[in-house]
């Protein structure tokens, strides 16, 4: 499901500049890093996060050179964190491709992630803006803390709805909130009230994005077009199954616990559908989507507002 053209229309020329500059930012003559970088480029996603940076800048003013640097810095930090996360989680797949650790090895993945992280810091420094550097640095800390919180939850073999949303707030929600903040901070026309509203929209988008991804994990792979059940296999409890557990009796909870321990993925996927877990997560997603749209409607009508509305709808309605 490609990103609708309506989303990138107000930033079309700037997005082309971003893509060119992003490609240049990932460059090394090192014989080991070159194939790793090529693999990262080939397996890159839809660039949802930098698109949001540009749209948020356009919503409150003009896109600047610093907006481009900030968008690149954020995407590089995101890529580096995914490479490192896959090492921690021992994941072999990322976006339907071999993960960096699977294609190369853990040592190269860690060092390659470090190189990309350093490139992110270089882009942030290029802005000569303490505010932008602070956003990138704070995001890096939050992503690390979020991953540690998730690891702690896996080791405890227990989660609940509060812990689930705490993890999201430190990871995906923090990432999209940073996109929004960087857009505002790098733009030519900002005030505190505008920044707070746009950051709230970004945070809500991030939660919706993660909820949708987690719902996908309970669908058959042939329906989504990429491997599913990965979080379940890695011992990650997400909202659909958490809701089923929290609304089950003791006997059913014990059966679910055994299935989770034994990695009975198909059984758990079916259970989330049958016992209302998917419906509950979907309702929560749409509730947060409406909240984001409500805040967005406080802004004057503009091409950027229309594009962000389409962006929010795409996040909630995408098929993969």
Image (cartoon, helix red, strand yellow):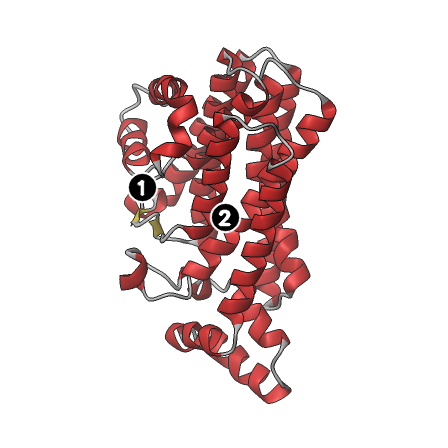
Marker disc for residue 57 = none
Q: Residues within 10 Å of mark 2 (few under 14, many from 20)?
A: many
Q: Position of residue 192 (x, y in %)?
A: 73, 24
Q: Position of residue 63 (x, y in %)?
A: 50, 16
Q: CA distance from mark 2 to mark 1?
A: 15 Å
Q: Residues within 10 Å of mark 1 (few under 14, many from 20)?
A: few
Q: Residue at x 47, y 58 (%)?
A: 214
Q: Foreground: 46 or 102?
A: 46
Q: Earlier in the sequence, mark 2 or mark 1?
A: 1
State left or right for residue 46 relative to residue 276. Answer: left
In this rendering, the count of numbered labels is: 2
Q: Callout 2: helix, strand or loop?
A: helix
Query: Residue 107's quadrant in the figure?
Result: top left
Q: Position of residue 66 (x, y in %)?
A: 53, 14
Q: Callout 1: helix, strand or loop?
A: loop
Q: Residue furthest bottom?
A: 251
Q: Residue at x 55, y 27 (%)?
A: 56
Q: Foreground: 286 or 82?
A: 286
Q: Is residue 220 above or below residue 300?
A: below
Residue 114 in sight: no
Name the front one of labels 2 and 1: 1
Q: Position of residue 125 (x, y in %)?
A: 55, 15
Check whether the beta carbons of the residues at disc 2 and disc 1 lie within 8 A of each other: no
State left or right for residue 242 relative to residue 303. Answer: right
Which residue position holds label 2?
209
Q: Residue at x 41, y 59 (%)?
A: 216
Q: Residue furthest front?
A: 301
Q: Foreground: 186 or 198?
A: 198
Residue 295 in sight: yes
Q: Residue at x 36, y 61 (%)?
A: 228
Q: Foreground: 28 or 313?
A: 313
Marker disc for residue 2 = 1
């Amino acid at each position: 499901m490609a990103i609708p053209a309506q989303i990138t229309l107000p930033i079309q020329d700037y997005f082309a500049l971003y893509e060119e500059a992003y490609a240049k930012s990932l460059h090394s003559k090192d014989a080991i890093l070159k194939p790793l970088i090529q693999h990262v480029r080939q397996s890159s996603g839809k660039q949802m996060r930098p698109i949001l940076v540009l749209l948020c800048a356009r919503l409150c003013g003009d896109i600047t050179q610093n907006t481009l640097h900030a968008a690149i810095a954020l995407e590089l930090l995101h890529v580096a964190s995914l490479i490192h996360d896959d090492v921690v989680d021992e994941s072999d797949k990322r976006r339907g491709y071999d993960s960096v650790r699977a294609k190369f090895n853990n040592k190269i993945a860690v060092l390659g992630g470090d190189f990309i992280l350093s490139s992110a810091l270089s882009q942030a420094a290029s802005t000569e803006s303490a505010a932008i550097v602070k956003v990138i640095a704070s995001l890096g800390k939050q992503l690390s803390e979020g991953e540690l919180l998730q690891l702690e939850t896996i080791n405890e073999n227990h989660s609940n709805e509060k812990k689930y949303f705490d993890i999201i707030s430190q990871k995906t929600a923090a990432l999209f909130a940073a996109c929004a903040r960087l857009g505002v901070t790098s733009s030519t026309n900002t005030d505190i009230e505008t920044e707070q509203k746009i950051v709230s929209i970004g945070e809500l988008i991030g939660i919706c994005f993660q909820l949708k991804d987690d719902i996908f994990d309970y669908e058959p792979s042939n329906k989504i077009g990429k491997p599913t059940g990965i979080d379940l296999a890695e011992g990650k409890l997400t909202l659909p199954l958490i809701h089923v557990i929290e609304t089950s009796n003791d006997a059913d909870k014990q059966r679910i616990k055994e299935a989770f321990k034994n990695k009975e993925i198909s059984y758990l996927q079916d259970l989330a559908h049958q016992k209302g877990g998917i419906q509950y997560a979907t309702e929560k997603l749409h509730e947060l989507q409406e909240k984001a749209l409500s805040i967005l409607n406080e802004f004057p009508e503009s091409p950027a507002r229309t594009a962000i509305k389409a962006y929010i709808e795409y996040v909630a309605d995408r098929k993969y």
